[in-house]
Amino acid sequence: MAAHASAAVNEELNYLNWQKGIWSWLSSTDHKRICFLYLFTILIFFLAGGVAALLVRTELAFAGPQIITDPHTYNVLFTMHGVFMIFLFVVPGIPATLGNFLIPLMIGAKDVAFPRLNLFSYYVYVVGALIGAVAMFNPVDTGWTFYAPYSTTTGTSVSLMVLAAFVLGFSSILTGLNFIVTIHQLRAPGMTWMRLPVFIWASYATAVIQTVATPVIGMTLLLIIAERAFGAGIFDPSKGGDPVLMEHLFWFYSHPVVYIMVLPAFGVIGEIIPVFSRKPLFGYKMVVISSMAIAAVGFIVWAHHMFVAGISDFSAKFFSIVTFLVAIPTAIKVFNWVSTMYKGSISFKTPMLYAMAFVFLFMVAGTTGIYLAMLGVDVYYHDTYFVVAHFHYTIQGGAVIGLIAALHFWFPKMTGKMYNETVSKFAFAALFIGFNLTFIPQFILGMEGMPRRYYDYPAQYQTLHTISTIGAYLNGFGYSFALINLLWVALFGKVKAPRNPYNSLSLEWQTQSPPLHENFAEIPVVTEEPYSYGTPTGRGH
Amino acid sequence: MSAVAHPIVDHNVPPGEPPHIHHMDTTTAYGAAKLGMWLFLGTEILLFAVMFCSFAIMRYYHLGEFHDASKHLNLWAGGFNTIVLLISSFTAAVAVTKAQKGDNAGVVKNFGFSLVCGLIFLCVKGYEYSEKARHGMFPFVWNSDFYHYKNFLGLYFCMSGLHALHVIIGMALLYWYGIRPAMRGRFSGKYYTPVELGALYWHLVDLIWIYLFPLLYLVG
Amino acid sequence: MLGLLGQQGSDFAHKVDYAHDVVTIISVICTVAIVGVMLYFAVIYRQRDGKDHETPRIEGNNTLEIIWTVFPTLVCIWVAWLGYDSFIDLRTPPANAMEINVTGRKWAWDFTYKNGKKTTGELVVPVDEPVKLVMTAKDVLHSFFVPVMRTKADVIPGRYTYEWFRPVQTGDFQVFCTEYCGNEHSKMLARLKVLPKAEFERWLADDSEARKLASLKPSDRGKELYVSKQCVTCHSLDGTPRVGPSWLKIFGKEGKLADGSTYKADENYIRESILQPQAKVVQGFPAMGMPSYQGQLSDDDITGIIEFMKTLDGTQKVEVAPALPKKSAASTVGMTPAERGKALFNDSGNMCATCHSIDGSALVGPSFKGLYGRKEKIADGTEVTVDDAYIKESIYKPTAKIVQGYAPAMPAMYEGKLSDQDVADITEYIKTLK
């Protein structure tokens, strides 16, 4: 396919300008362009899921019906909020966007192992999204968890929606597979495993989970379709099936999926803090081991979502203990990040603010998870607002904050432009305050016993709900502001970014901003350990 | 660096030569392809594992029904299909050795044989399904006499149906990535990756059936 | 200790709360410590004047890694054990626990006692005695959550699950459904009523009404319920419209709804009107006049009422004994006036709680919370102060001064049923609801 070197004389040739036109974007196998294809699409669903959330929160601001007069509409809205956010936004999330952009650059490769498969996986995602859009004509009201027998008997478009989720899962599997092969096969000379940036390790662990866990949910969703289409009787007790089996199969994927969502964010934070502290990542080996440990142990904790679902007391004991086990590596990471800042030279650019906020938000997320890992306490908290607040801290305060932080950090690399720090910091403040204002009242609501997925509630819970709704609006404003700022600067910004504005030692920053289509003029040879910031102490460790 | 687009995989090379890959050398590309295929096969196994697991649990709850329902499966057809697939796996493996020797005609013959076996398998399966439908033991045409076999049959159709779909996919792969290029003399000792990967996929299809057959037809 | 989970209603609640308190303290300390250290480092190691300063290339510290791996592990083991310790009690009912069968269905809870007595929406148990709930669901997954007891268990169709507790104090407590089950999931509530032992025994033995109902043919059952559930207060049998339409010839009737669309009073319409009265109100009748019976009537009850309606076709005169609702026999000796007023309010025979809440939410009638001394605008626009005289008038002559925004739905049935002393006691109770 002929292309023209249409860059202006004083503008460097890079992956953005070496080919122009919408078709060159839609058919590009360049991992960097595919990042943007994914980014724009998942942000659309972030917006849709966010609107659903605001409608839900507006309804819940006061007791009694407000803007939604029938419970079915409410049920559809919280279902769509969950489905859009999880399957269409956060699961592709960092891997499909930043993962795609950075992995080849960080390991010194020209592209991922299977570039055409990469583009194909994007279009599989689009097909999944389109099937989901068709399902919106009779939108699903089961909750994103699709529990049987409600999901196998309700009249809404469950089959279409789970088919969409199946197709989206296929996209996720292909991305994971691509990344595993890339990291194994395409590292630059000298880039040994223990010289890889932690973002790569995190992406690798994530890719393993994507590849292993997703087929399980895929098949489970197909079985739901079989159950609805020809009454196979696997999950519906009225036909001899077992609803708890469905829960087991569902959570076998849906617990590891939260690590798909959050591990890359851990990787992002591990990249940001050393750069803005001018110090090596403290305990690099332990951080790497903890990523792999989380991925592995994350596969055996699934039934902690089912402590009151009718599993045996013995199973409950087992799953509670291993859930504690998976909390420890996360704590280790947090300790190592904070220790990185010790005797550092710390600057407070926007990415660093997000990273520091992440430490706080994830401490809340992790410690509230402890409550839920404890058997007696989980009996009280299961299916209450406490759980809702906990998982929003992990997913939003973790994965989404990680994505926003990453977009700000690598923005100059991806676009060659710089955004205005004051604007981005203002957005950060709104987002951070709004988020906490939304969810801290929800912990208290949970303590007071308020169940989740409730369209209406007893009046005594109202004040906390009102506060939470105010926070939600501020939260939404913060995200909108942050993302619109980045979008605006990306399209119309004039301030050119230096090649390496933050003086990072990582490979992706050693090449021009934005990078060439082939990433590197010459494949680099790696000789140094990662994160060699600062003056050698001579004392080693 | 050039502003001209390269295709990712350029097959415009002399016959028997590996294609040019835009961003990898030949050895790396070969390793990448194999690793990718093995990972993919892993995901396929996990896919079927869910149904094996569900089968085990449903059987535990409904042992009598499963036992009875399984007797209604055609053991001869299933057994015949097993032999057919085993032979096809053998010829697929032979095709790989032929490719390694540069014997493209051998690839066409052996993969072709595997493909025909696949077709036979599907025909026998089709016959089995039509028999079930005739007796009212098929979705949408249930005979209420057999209603209590629903749990077993539901899983039977899901498992064997999904497997049959994979047989079709496998046949397509054998043809498009094996037979078709081999007819143009594409393969040699230097380059036989698609044959190897296609054969791997076919082996998986066979392997799944090796587990399906005893479970559905024998153990019941 | 910290009291974060509210009232402790069961004998093992304190164990759950203790575990909860321990984790709360540890979590707060850890979060404050780590975030505090991070902020401390951020401040003392910050770049000054935007200038980068020299930093040591510290790559790690094995001792620290060991400490902060081992120590959290030990804490986790302790905390896991606390969780298990509180859990094991919740899952081990005593052998002598009284069993009650619970059925969850869309969208109500049915309870069946060993002697055959059945209730819907209300679980009555004796204080200080262990109770084991043997539960199943009729349709989809539900979950039975009693916050004050700290127990919860999913209720699954096709199998039985259980939960148990031993209440340590009397009172009325909330029960929630905590597994999403469809449209009315948030309305699938129940009341747990813990009674003193003697009163419970009396209640349990008094199944005469339930047994009588069960033995009647459906239309007679409906006729009984028409009286005992107070439908008679708002729906006449002779054609006279009251707060609600008359039931004479109501079955199959067609007409217009408030929004102009048409309705036909078939079985489904009647069932919907009983469970969701605001859904399809007939034109000309107040929108918020009827309280919902969601969770209070079994399916057989509703069928009976419908069958009773079918008999009201005008071919024969139907008379019902205008039975005054029974007052509970509970003794009020030794109670203060406000306590006596509260007992009267809670007495289901008086039906105050059907239309007036005490938590601020407006039902069919205004909430009693903060009511006393308030200035209200009434229907004709004039302002009144809610004082003793107003309350007395509103009880005996409900339609005299109705607060703006409320329907004239309160029955005029208290004249002769509640004495002046009763009214004064109720007023005293209202005064306590600030």
Image (spheres, coloured by chain):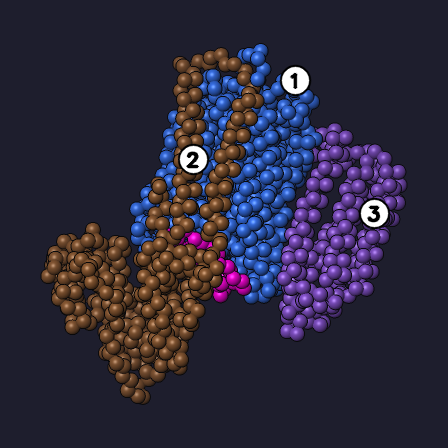
* Closer to us: A291 or C72: C72
The reply to whether the magenta stretch includes residue C145 is yes
Chain that is blue in the image: A
x and y percentages locating residue C31 in the rendered image: 42, 32
- Residue position marked by numbered label 3 in the rendering: B92
Residue C294 image point, x, y percent: 36, 65
Magenta segment, which residues? C136-163
Callout 1: few (<14), some (14-19), or many (20+) C-alpha neighbours within 10 Å?
few
In this picture, is B203 found above or below A229?
Answer: above
**Residue pushed farthest bottom?**
C315
Q: As drawn, is A38 to the left or to the right of C109?
A: right
Question: Is disc 2 surrounded by few (<14), some (14 to 19) or many (20+) residues within 10 Å?
Answer: some
Q: Which residue is mark 1?
A: A527
Give the tally of numbered discs: 3
**Res C196 visible:** yes
Tell me if residue A96 comes above or below residue C151 in the rendering.
above
Residue lying at 42% horizontally and 56% vertically, measured from the top left? C165
Q: Amino acid at mark 3?
A: Ala
